[in-house]
Image (cartoon, rainbow, N blue to C red):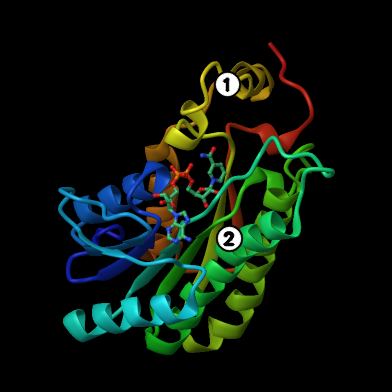
Amino acid sequence: MNAANFEGKVVVVTGGASGIGAAICEVFQEAGAKVWCADLELADGKGWESRVCDVSDETQVTAFFEEVFAEEGRLDVVVNNAGIQPLGVSIAETTPELMNKTLEVNVSGALWGVKQAAARMTAGGSVVNLASFVGTLGVPDGMAYAVSKAGVAHLTKCAALELAGKGIRVNAVAPGTIRTPAVEGIPDNPEIPFVEGRTPLGRLGEPEEVARVVLFLASEAASYITGAIVPVDGGISAGWERYE
Ligand code: NAD
């Protein structure tokens, strides 16, 4: 049996128009799945179905999943990847608007995806959420983001418990710093050499390296894993210093 064969399976990926989400769409498509992407932007020309949908708005999320279900008649995997990453924002600069928006997109957005999975999936279904290493480790000038990702990790555990009886697994990946437009788009981003210097593996991660773990967690190969937060971070969460 090829545990990572998704032929005939229907997979929803939020935030699939860019970065890690696009890599996730790609690995599932290569594994034979029918992939549907929900994003603020259309993921044009990439071979999977794409719709504009703001994950922080439950009405839009419900309408999106209704369309997927009406078209496909099944739902096998939901990857809650859409997120915003407000970093470089001090406590003094953190406004109610920023805090609320970050929680609405990153935490509530994942919750609405989990809610749809709970309503529409049958036994064997699987949810994978995108947490972050800063959801476990603290980070200066990124409190709203870090708190939101701690929320995603905790939401994952609560959902895993609630849905286990239905045979639906819920896990998360917690990436370190990954080479995506959000990270590389900042000219001379000081975070890049800083992270390279501190990460035990000595480099940033690539989107495909996260996507492959998402695929594994969603697959039959991970059939006894639920409620797990899996680090994909080059070892940065293992300790406090990089050794040569
Ligand atoms: P990205 O900015 O490249 O892509 C995020 C995608 O989400 C974009 O296509 C964006 O349009 C979409 N999106 C944003 N708000 C949305 C909304 N309200 N509704 C629907 N779609 C929305 O980001 P990325 O770096 O690929 O990150 C993907 C996920 O991984 C995020 O949840 C992020 O927090 C997490 N993550 C990223 C890193 C990293 O280093 N890049 C590290 C840890 C965790």
Does the rendering let one see residue 148?
Answer: yes
- Residue 125 placement, left or right of 131: left
Q: Are marks 2 and 1 in contact (CB under 8 Å)?
A: no
Quadrant, the C terminus: top right
Quadrant, the N terminus: bottom left
Q: Looking at the image, is 242 positioned above or below residue 70?
A: above
Amino acid residing under circle 2: Asn
Residue drawn at x 64%, y 33% is: 235
Q: Where does label 2 land, which residue?
A: 106
Place residue 217 in its image quadrant: bottom left
Residue drawn at x 43%, y 34% is: 181
In this view, the residue in front, 20 or 31, is 20
Q: Earlier in the sequence, mark 2 or mark 1?
A: 2
Q: Is mark 2 within 8 Å of ligand 1?
A: yes
**Residue 7, percent across and down?**
18, 65
**Residue 139, percent across and down?**
76, 39
